[in-house]
Image (cartoon, rainbow, N blue to C red):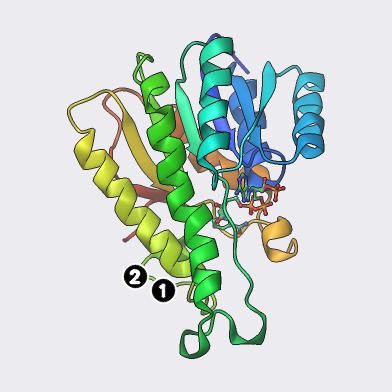
Amino acid sequence: MERVNASKTALVTGANKGIGFAIAQGLGALGFTIVVGARDDIRRKEAVERLLAAGVDAYGVALDVTSDESVTAAAAVIDQTSGRLDVLINNAGVAGRFEDGAQDPTTLDLDVVRTVLDTNVFGVVRVTNTMLYLLRRSAAPRIVNLSSTMGSLTLQAGPILAAYAPSKTMLNSITAQYARRLADTNVIVNAACPGYVATDFNGFDGPRTPAEGAAVVIRLATLPDDGPRGGFFDDSGPVPW
Ligand code: NAP
């Protein structure tokens, strides 16, 4: 594959496994320097080593998207190492506990809702706003938020999960807010659904591979300057909100 993006830097949150790791592999193969954002030291180191072994330029930053201190420190490392950020992939996400009716709306455990929102929504806002000054230094900054058709109010896809699904609905809404706010800048923000992908997230139950799930994300991360903004896409094109 042609390394057309050499010298560009992409941060992938939750890049140590699953779809995040596949996004890192895919963008790395296109020539991006990959910043592996991961909260666990050992898993982060192993992911960086796997990428380096595959010929990808990569380094790790400690990153817990629920922690102001962690995200601020990660931005400082990227600033010192790369000086700017061209692509931010907000991939880190959690499904939340669902045993014992915890995500049945009629018995919903509000602590689970708080936990899921903390990572899937507030984490995205925290990381995006902290990294924005680095993205603004890029000639063509792109932000992709990992959403899900489960968050589509039109489709209402998948099982009833009254913390997870609304977290992706709110993420979609926040994505639109960012796109409106950044409409007159070169920062392009979109949301992506990877489809149902076999990862730890669902006990490796999904029919799609992480690489297949990563494809739409990589496409949105490498949009031309006149590409779509503030949309929600999967492999087939726009997804209804
Ligand atoms: P996964 O294999 O469980 O990976 C999730 C990643 O997020 C892991 O690297 C995890 O790190 C990281 N993470 C969780 N909380 C974090 C935090 N507070 N700070 C930093 N990293 C954190 O799941 P996946 O299937 O690849 O999912 C990736 C994204 O795709 C999620 O946003 C998910 O909602 C979305 N998605 C997945 C599917 C699917 O079918 N799999 C479908 C639609 C959307 P640890 O290893 O440290 O836990």
Residues at marks 2 and 1, CA–CA distance in whole angstroms: 5 Å
Horizontal and vertical percent for residue 194? 54, 51
Left or right of residue 4: residue 167: left
The residue positioned 82% from the left and 21% from the top of the image is 53
**Residue at far bottom of view:** 106
Q: Nearer the viewer, residue 189 or 30?
A: 189
Q: Are marks 2 and 1 in contact (CB under 8 Å)?
A: yes
* Location of residue 198 by image quarter: bottom right
Kindly identify the residue that appears in the image at 69 percent across and 47 percent down: 18
Residue located farthest toward the front when viewing the structure as drawn: 69
Which quadrant is home to the C terminus?
A: bottom left
Q: Position of residue 47 (x, y in %)?
A: 76, 32
Residue toward you, 207 or 170: 170
Disc 1 residue type (three-letter)? Gln
> Which residue occupies the foreground of this view, 239 or 24?
24
Locate residue 144, reporting x and y percent.
44, 39
Q: Is mark 1 within 8 Å of ligand 1?
A: no
**How dense is the environment of label 2, judged by Cα within 10 Å: few (below 14), some, or many (20 and up)?**
few
Question: Mark 2 — residue?
Answer: 153
Query: On the rendered structure, is 229 left or right of 169?
Result: left
Residue 50 visible to the viewer: yes
Task: Give the numbered dot on residue 156.
Answer: 1
Residue 194 or 67: which is nearer the viewer? Answer: 67
Q: Quadrant of residue 35?
A: top right
Residue located at (37% from left, 14% from top): 137
Side of 56 relative to 182 (left or right): right
Could you tell me residue 72's position as x and y percent? 51, 30
Q: Quadrant of residue 129?
A: top left
- Number of marks drawn: 2
Query: Is residue 107 rendered to the left or right of residue 26?
Result: left
State the SS at label 1.
loop
